[in-house]
Image: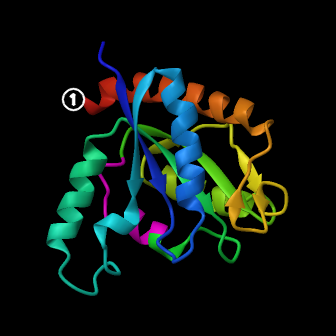
Amino acid sequence: MSKLNIGIILGSTRQGRLSPQVGEWVKIIADQRGDANYEIIDIADYKLPLLGEEDATEQATAWNTKLASLDGFVFIVQEYNHSISASLKNALDYAREAWNNKAAGIVSYGSVGGARAAEHLRGILGELSVADVRVHPALSLFTDFENGTVFKPADLHLVNVNGMLDQVIAWSGALKPLRQN
């Protein structure tokens, strides 16, 4: 059986964002496992305007094509005002079927580990028929980021990232037959 394709989605487009550091860390851990093809997907690269405000056929087509090529996801989610970023919500809304019957893990960060954003994302993913996994690495802005800008995760997070990836791979594989109909 061929390896699954898992997208590590950076959930922010904000200048000075920390998600690229977190995403690279997750990808390094994931690549060492050798159990899937992992790729960072930066929503900023797709230049999605606010949904419905202008013709975005080209951007939406590129976004949906990329999502359709993936078997599962790891969302890198930062907490903004107790929720996910507007850019991530917008990107989620630009697709429907491309999300369906896939699995997702969440790595969040914020003042309380990004837990509130992760819980909001879980509700949205359910509506998109994405099965979110239980293991959830939650990173603190106070202990996992030096001066709030340089990502220096505590070693204990490695266990949670690998546990989350175990579940994403298992669920993505189990859901694959549903996507082949």
| Crowding near the residue tagged with mark 1, few <14, some 14–19, many ≥20 C-alpha atoms within 10 Å | few
Q: Is residue 89 magenta?
A: yes
Q: Is 30 positioned to the left or the right of 68 in the image? A: right
- Give the residue type that dot 1 points to: Asn
In the rendered image, the vertical position of residue 66 relative to residue 134, given as above or below: below
Q: Residue furthest bottom?
A: 53
Q: Position of residue 141 (x, y in %)?
A: 77, 63
Residue 83 quadrant: bottom right
Q: Is residue 164 magenta?
A: no
In the rendered image, the vertical position of residue 21 relative to residue 103, given as above or below: below
Residue 121 seen in this snapshot: no
Nearer to me, 107 or 40: 40
Question: Residue at horizontal 38%, vertical 38%?
Answer: 101
In the rendered image, the vertical position of residue 128 relative to residue 73, given as above or below: below
Secondary element at tag 1: loop
Q: Position of residue 33 (x, y in %)?
A: 53, 22
Q: Which residue is mark 1?
A: 181
In the rendered image, the vertical position of residue 133 relative to residue 162, given as above or below: below
Q: Which residues are magenta?
A: 88-99
Q: Is 126 positioned to the left or the right of 150 in the image? A: left
